Amino acid sequence: DTGVSQNPRHKITKRGQNVTFRCDPISEHNRLYWYRQTLGQGPEFLTYFQNEAQLEKSRLLSDRFSAERPKGSFSTLEIQRTEQGDSAMYLCAIRDGNSPLHFGNGTRLTVT
Amino acid sequence: GEDVEQSLFLSVREGDSSVINCTYTDSSSTYLYWYKQEPGAGLQLLTYIFSNMDMKQDQRLTVLLNKKDKHLSLRIADTQTGDSAIYFCAETYGTASKLTFGTGTRLQVTL
C-alpha cells in the first residue's frame, strides 16, 4: 500500500478526446506532485501543489493540461484534446516536509 | 540544468552482488534517492541518503555517495530474482524539492 490511490489504472481514448485522472492520498499530506513517465524513460515532473495552491508547473505542462486540488486533499489532472504524444503513465506522489516522495501506481493513458 | 545519468542495463546471477551506478550534475542536491519499479507498477522507494552522508546501509542495500565526483551507487547483496526491476536514481534540488530522475537501470537476475 503506497498511501496513494490513482484512478483509473488504465485509460484508452481516441485522439482529440478529453480525459481526467484522479489522485487520492489516503491521509492528509501537504504536498502533492504529478509526474509523467513515457516508455523507457524516468518520470518527469509536471506540477505540484502545497495544500490547494499550485506552486509550480513544468514547461511540459502545455495549455491542454490542467491540474486542480480544490480542498487540498485529492487532485485531478485533465488533458484536453488528447494527442498521441500524450500516451504515457501519469504518476501522482505525496510528500510531507523533507520526507521522500511516495508514488501511486499510476494511470496508464493510451491515445489511439 | 539538472541531469541524472544511469547505465541502461545490468545482468547478474542470483546470489551475486549488484551495483547500480548514477551520476548527477547539481552540486546543490540535498537528498538522493533510489526507487524500484516493477512492470506496470508505480515507483517504490528503496532508500535515500542525505547529501552530507557518505554511506547508508539498510539490510541488503548499501548506498555510497561521492559528492566530489557527483556519483551515487546502490549495491544489492545476495541478489534475488525478485530484485529484477528497473532502478531509478533521483535527486532533489530547489525550494520545491521536486525530484529529477535518471532514465533507469534495468536489472536482470539470472539463475
Image: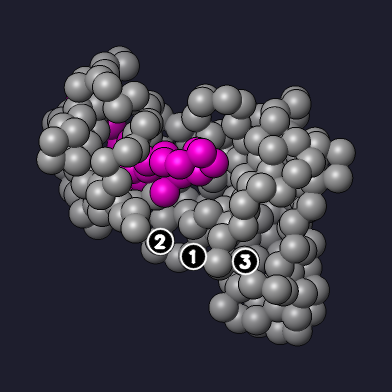
Instruction: Look at the image and say whether residue B98 sits in the magenta stretch.
Output: yes
Residue lying at 34% horizontally and 54% vertically, measured from the top left: B2
- How far apart marks 2 and 1 lie (CA) works out to 6 Å
- How far apart marks 1 and 3 lie (CA) works out to 14 Å
**Under tag 1, what secondary structure?**
loop
Which quarter of the picture shows residue A71? top right
Would you say residue B109 is visible in this rendering? no
Which quarter of the picture shows residue B50? top left
For disc 3, the neighbor class at 10 Å (few under 14, some 14 to 19, many from 20) is some
The C terminus of chain B lies in quadrant: top left
**Mark 2 residue type:** Gln
For disc 2, the neighbor class at 10 Å (few under 14, some 14 to 19, many from 20) is few
Residue occupying the far right of the picture: A71
**Under tag 3, what secondary structure?**
loop
The mark found on residue A41 in the picture is 2
Span of residues in magenta: B77-100
**Under tag 2, what secondary structure?**
loop
- Depth check, front residue: A70 or A14: A70
Asked if marks 1 and 3 fall on the same chain, the answer is yes
For disc 1, the neighbor class at 10 Å (few under 14, some 14 to 19, many from 20) is some
Residue A37 position, x and y percent, is: 51, 59
Residue under numbered circle 1: A38
